């Protein structure tokens, strides 16, 4: 199954207030509205970048088969020093982000 995605961003938010937060987000096109995309840390950790795995959870309900864009986000608190992110789906690199937006 081929996955379409777009608008990927990696951001380290150091704005005063809630404390620093690192997040990766984008849009994934899924086969129907009953599928929820999730980003989780990858089991493969021997990479020079942060590896994340895209998981698709199906609610197994009755859904209209229509392509649907869904927002997906990975978020952790802390002042991380990450410069690159790789997003994998079924063991294949789906997206590589080589710029991390830093807001201060």
Image (cartoon, grey):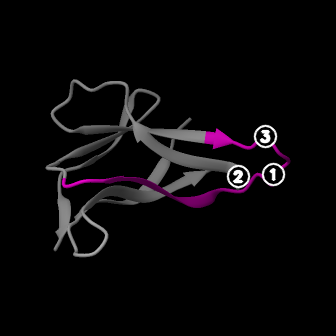
The answer to whether mark 2 and mark 1 are in CB contact below 8 A is yes
**Residue at (19% x, 47% y) in the render:** 84
Horizontal placement of 12 versus 61: left or right?
A: left
On the image, numbered disc 2 is attached to which residue?
32
* Boundaries of the magenta span: 57-79
Quick one: label 2, few (<14), some, or many (20+) residues within 10 Å?
Answer: some
On the image, numbered disc 1 is attached to which residue?
63
Q: Is residue 44 above or below residue 101?
A: above
**Distance in Å between CA atoms under marks 2 and 1:** 6 Å
Q: Is residue 96 above or below residue 44?
A: below
Rendered image: mark on residue 8 = none
**Residue at (43% x, 40% y) in the render:** 40
Quick one: label 1, few (<14), some, or many (20+) residues within 10 Å?
Answer: few
Residue 53 location in percent, x, y? 42, 37
User: Residue 95 lies in what quarter of the image?
Assistant: top left
User: Residue 85 lies in what quarter of the image?
Assistant: top left
On the image, numbered disc 3 is attached to which residue?
60
Horizontal placement of 68 versus 41: left or right?
A: right
Residue 35 location in percent, x, y? 66, 48
Identify which residue, 22 or 30, lies in the foreground. Answer: 22
- Secondary structure under tag 1 reads loop
**Distance in Å between CA atoms under marks 3 and 1:** 8 Å
Asked if residue 83 shows in the view, the reply is: no
**Residue at (17% x, 57% y) in the render:** 99
- Secondary structure under tag 2 reads loop
The answer to whether mark 3 and mark 1 are in CB contact below 8 A is no
Q: Is residue 37 above or below residue 18?
A: above
């Amino acid at each position: 199954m081929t996955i379409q995605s777009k608008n990927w961003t990696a951001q380290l938010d150091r704005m005063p207030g809630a404390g620093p937060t690192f997040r990766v987000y984008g849009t994934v096109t899924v086969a129907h509205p009953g599928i929820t995309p999730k980003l989780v840390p990858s089991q493969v950790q021997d990479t020079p970048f942060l590896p994340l795995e895209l998981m698709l959870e199906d609610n197994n309900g009755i859904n209209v088969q229509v392509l649907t864009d869904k927002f997906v986000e990975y978020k952790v608190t802390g002042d991380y020093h990450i410069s690159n992110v790789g997003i994998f789906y079924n063991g294949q690199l789906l997206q590589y982000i080589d710029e991390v937006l830093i807001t201060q």
